[in-house]
Amino acid sequence: MGSKNKLKRFKENETFKNVIQPERSLLENDAFEMKGNWHAQFFKNDRPIVLELGCGKGEYTLHLANESLDKNFIGIDIKGARFWRGAKTALEQNKENVGFVRSQIELIDTLFAPQEVSEIWITFPDPQIKFKRTKHRLTHPEFLKKYKQILHPKGSVHLKTDSEFLHGYTLGILNDPAYELCYAHHDIYNNPQAPKMAVAVQTFYEKMFLEQNKPITYLQFQFN
């Protein structure tokens, strides 16, 4: 994508009522006014809030929102030019239960209050295979602590990835009494018993992986 196109999308994002782009300094000082107020101020209802972390173009966020009108959905990504598409589509389709936030995932506990979120989806994150980048993996224990903090008790986390490495790494972490593994499969599209929401939509990158015959893995877990 050319820089002109990116600038245009950044400008458009600023006009979208369903996009919030808090300053990093605001989050670092834990001064984000929407924290704890998403139901009252943004969605103006008390329906459960579901997050998609690293939402990319927002395909999953939009699909989940279509399937579950009784819930609210927020896609989070640092790359605003990517989720511009999802935000624009949501506005065009008058989806009142969808929002997007431009932020680093590491600041998620400054975006949401304790137990403000009911469910988290992590779709095709960078597996960060190099050892030195372990702490950047979205299922690293430091991230999991933050997810537990903002999730309702028994709220679920879903991980869908083409990376067998990340799938295995996460299963290793979940082999601990602190977590409850609800479901796991190393090739979700070759499993007739796959949960519907795990296979009902394919992201832009997922379609590319499937065309390359890469198996897609999926797991769901909760915190004890």
Image (cartoon, rainbow, N blue to C red):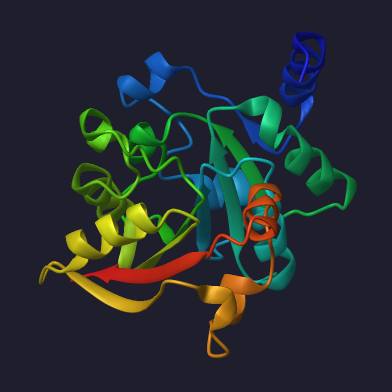
Q: For the N terminus, which image quadrant?
A: top right
Where residue 47 sits: x, y (%)? 56, 65
Identity of the residue drawn at 19% across and 62% down: 172
Residue 9 in the figure: left or right of residue 205: right
**Foreground residue, 5 or 91?**
5
Q: Quadrant of residue 35?
A: top left
Q: Residue furthest bottom?
A: 193
Q: Which residue occupies the foreground of this view, 29 or 198?
A: 198
How many circles with numbers are drawn on the protein? 0
Vertical side of 203 occupied by 125: above or below: above
- Kindly tell me whether residue 137 is visible in this rendering: yes
Q: Position of residue 188 (x, y in %)?
A: 52, 75
- Left or right of 209, for residue 25: left
Q: Is 156 in front, or is 214?
A: 214
Residue 126 % position (x, y)? 44, 40
Q: The C terminus appears in which quarter of the rendering? A: bottom left
Q: Image check: 150 left or right of 86?
A: left
In the depicted structure, whether residue 46 falls above or below residue 30: below
Q: Residue furthest front?
A: 212
135 vs 217: above or below: above
Asked whether residue 154 is in view, the answer is no
Position of residue 145 in the picture relative to residue 97 (left or right)? left
Image location (x, y in percent) of residue 207: 70, 56
Query: Residue at horizontal 26%, vertical 55%?
Result: 169
In percent of the image, x 59 and y 27: which residue is there? 79
Q: Could you tell me which residue is drawn at 74 percent across and 33 percent down?
A: 84
| Quarter location, residue 28 | top left
